[in-house]
Amino acid sequence: MYEFLSQNSLYVVLLIALIGWLGIVFYLFRLNKKIDKLEKMFKE
């Protein structure tokens, strides 16, 4: 396992970056849903 990670360090970095971006997208999606809910509440 360690040998694979040391030989393919570029893929490991790209995987970590992808996980980070997916986390940011998920957070923004949840935040948008909460904001929509608040806007709907204030309109009523």
Image (cartoon, rainbow, N blue to C red):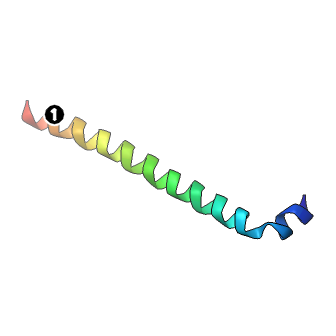
* Image coords of residue 29 (percent x, y): 37, 44
Instruction: Specify few, some or many for label 1: CA neighbours under 10 Å numbering under 14, 14-19, or 20 or more.
Output: few
Q: What is the residue that sits farthest to the top in this orientation?
A: 44
* Nearer the observer, 30 or 12: 12
Above or below, 37 relative to 5: above
Q: Position of residue 41 (x, y in %)?
A: 15, 33
Out of 16 and 11, give the one closest to the viewer: 11
Up/down of 17 relative to 37, above or below:
below
Q: Is residue 3 left or right of residue 16?
A: right
Task: Give coordinates of residue 6: x percent, y percent.
Answer: 85, 70
Q: For this view, does 16 lie left or right of residue 33?
A: right
Could you say whether the residue bearing mark 1 is in a helix, strand or loop? helix
Residue at image point 51% right, 51% down: 22
Quadrant assignment, res 44? top left
User: Which residue is located at x 76 percent, y 69 percent?
Assistant: 9
Q: In the visual, does 16 lie left or right of 25? A: right
Residue 33's place in the image compared with 1, above or below, is above
The quadrant in which residue 42 appears is top left
Q: Which residue is mark 1?
A: 40
Using the image as rendered, state which of residue 19 and residue 4 is in the foreground. 4
The spot of residue 37 in percent (x, y) is 24, 35
| Three-letter residue code for mark 1 | Lys
Position of the N terminus by quadrant: bottom right
Q: Is residue 44 left or right of residue 12?
A: left
The number of numbered discs placed on residues in the rendered structure image is 1
Q: Residue at x 44, y 51 (%)?
A: 25
Residue placed farthest to the left in the image? 44
